[in-house]
Image: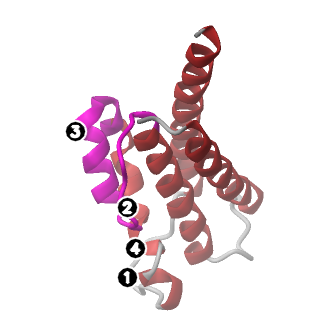
Amino acid sequence: MKDPEQVAVLLEAAERDFSALRAMGNNPDFADEIFGFHAQQAAEKSFKAWLALLGEGYPTTHDLIRLLKMLIQHDENATRFKALGDYGPYAVQFRYITDPSARPLDRDAAVKHLEALLEHVRSMFADLREAKDDQ
């Protein structure tokens, strides 16, 4: 069952994380670990909102790859967001320990991917609301 209220909560939370990313931009005062954490959170909440829009339950997890696999089973369009799976370690692992071998994040690419993801989920949500209004 599709739960519009849950979708709205998740989407609003994802938007807040995305706003933080945009505000950070390429400012070196914000470490990649902080930027990566908000990128991971925006992706996680967006993926969960998408699953909810599909009427699917989702696990309590920070594992973006797991969420992506669930999405791809129900919507092949999710494959275009596979690159966001790279932000999974920023949910827990890189919040506490910096990976000295990690290359700097491409923040512009992250913002671009997340913007596309959010636009996709927003569009699906708008379609759901419109269909509900037509009933």
* Image-based side of 42 in relation to 54, left or right: right
The kind of residue tagged 3 is Gln
**Contact (CB < 8 A) between labels 1 and 3?**
no
Q: Is residue 106 above or below residue 112?
A: below
The tag earlier along the polypeptide, 2 or 3, is 3
Q: Secondary structure at mark 3?
A: helix
Q: Secondary structure at mark 2?
A: helix
Q: Please name the residue that numbered disc 1 is placed on.
A: 101
Q: Is residue 64 above or below residue 126?
A: below
Q: In which quadrant of the rendered image does the N terminus lie? A: top left
Image mark count: 4
The kind of residue tagged 2 is Asp
Residue 113 x/y as whole percent:
51, 43
**Contact (CB < 8 A) between labels 4 and 3?**
no
Q: Nearer the viewer, mark 4 or mark 3?
A: 3
**Mark 4: few, some, or many residues within 10 Å (few <14, many ≥20)?**
some
**Mark 2: few, some, or many residues within 10 Å (few <14, many ≥20)?**
few
The tag earlier along the polypeptide, 4 or 1, is 4
Q: Nearer the viewer, mark 2 or mark 3?
A: 3
Q: CA distance from mark 1 to mark 3?
A: 33 Å
The kind of residue tagged 4 is Pro
Which mark, by number, is residue 112?
Answer: none
Question: Is 61 included in the stretch rendered in magenta?
Answer: yes
Q: CA distance from mark 4 to mark 1?
A: 14 Å
Q: Give the quarter of the image for residue 52.
A: top left
Residue 36 x/y as whole percent:
54, 68
* Image-based side of 81 in relation to 91, left or right: left
Q: Please name the residue that numbered disc 3 is placed on.
A: 73
Question: Is 22 included in the stretch rendered in magenta?
Answer: no
Q: Secondary structure at mark 1?
A: loop
Q: Residue at x 70, y 73 (%)?
A: 28
Q: Please name the residue that numbered disc 4 is placed on.
A: 89
